Image (spheres, rainbow, N blue to C red):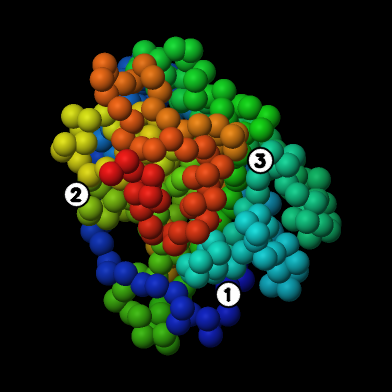
Amino acid sequence: MVVLSQPALDDFSVIKTCKPTSGPFNEIPVIDLKNPKAKARIVEACEEFGFFKVVNHGVSMELMEKLESEAVKFFKLPQSQKDRAGPPNPFGYGNKRIGPNGDVGWVEYLLFSTNLEFISQKSLSIFQKNPEVFRCAVNEYVSAVREMVCEVSEMIADELKIEPRNVLSRLLRDEKSDSFFRLNHYPAISFSELQAVRVSGRNVVGFGEHTDPQIISAVRSNNTTGLQISLRDGAWVSVPPDHHSFFINVGDSLQVTSNPILLKFPVSSLVMTNGRFRSLRHRVLADSLKSRVSMIYFGGPPLGEKITPLPSLMDEGEESLYKEFTWCEYKKSAYKTRLGDNRLRLFEKN
Ligand code: GA4
């Protein structure tokens, strides 16, 4: 069991808790990227859950483990040393505070932009022993995951018969792509700590519920539970861990459903698909036994890119459900919201 240094307990009172939920959810679509039916299954999963697991993805376990071990080394550093890479604005090291508007969680993290050579000098300076090893681990990992996510995006385009097939992936590959990378550490919480703060019987929230504002995200974690997703009926279910695989989720910017689907489901998500896909509401609970380390690639477009429905997905006479906006405008607006807010609502036409 990996137990890393923990945030001071006297801050515990600010952390949210929630009621325990049901056991593992075993219906998460599992997509084998090499399977000939993968394209159709990805699109189905984006429509039904906004979420799926990818196996046979081509990203080597060695890359994942190398980065995980570098992340563990970082999070084990004394607090004062880690603090030198913070506060996050939004990039850098953060502890418990998430975003600029008062959200907190049982989590510490490193947030990077992927277009500043992935890791800024500020974050690197704390890796005094061997910053290059860390830099390489992040760069290699992010490059490989981005390629895999681009492949998934192209499979989506193929299945939806959108041309050119790189309509989404070109945004992620663009050198101005505004993509992020995040390393999260959710420290273990012992039973006695839980009792000390009188929250026994409840779960401690590591990262509160939210949707990702970007196009698409890919999460890989060590073999720990904690990730939960919200189903269409609003029920929270736990994602069984799998450290060999990636969990992919649809972000706000990928879309907002076509009108017939909107009649059946609430408008919650994003835009390029005018509502056909749903962006995924998810959260992470801290675990009482094992610390969780996750690595997330958030694929975003260049800042000036307009987020509008892809023309080929619109039926004749169909209009966008959203006012036209650029990724820059959406992101600015997102940073004024609280984590759990419905950020797209502000951009709905009515
Ligand atoms: C959620 C998804 C990504 O983790 C993130 C988060 C960002 C941050 O931590 O700085 C935000 C959050 C996320 C959405 C609303 C704002 C911005 C915290 C917050 C309260 C990096 C992102 O892009 O948006």
Q: Do the residues under discs 1 and 2 have CB atoms within 8 angstroms?
A: no
Gap in Å between the C-alphas at discs 2 and 3? 35 Å
- For disc 2, the marked residue is 233
| Between discs 2 and 3, the one toward the N terminus | 3
For disc 2, the neighbor class at 10 Å (few under 14, some 14 to 19, many from 20) is few
Gap in Å between the C-alphas at discs 1 and 2? 35 Å
| Between discs 1 and 3, the one toward the N terminus | 1
Gap in Å between the C-alphas at discs 1 and 3? 27 Å
- For disc 1, the marked residue is 7
Q: What residue type is labelled 3?
A: Thr
Q: What element carries label 2?
A: loop
Q: What residue type is labelled 1?
A: Pro
User: Residue at 59% of width from left, 52% of height from top?
Assistant: 183
Position of residue 61 relative to residue 315, above or below, is below
Q: Which amino acid does label 2 sit on?
A: Asp
Position of residue 315 relative to residue 222, above or below, is above
Q: Which of 240 and 172 is in front in this view?
A: 172
User: Residue at 49% of width from left, 41% of height from top?
Assistant: 214
The answer to whether one can see residue 199 in this image is: yes
- In front: mark 1 or mark 2? 2
Q: Relative to 26, is 251 on the left or the right? A: right
As drawn, the label of residue 146 is: none
For disc 1, the neighbor class at 10 Å (few under 14, some 14 to 19, many from 20) is some
Q: In which quarter of the image is residue 340?
A: bottom left
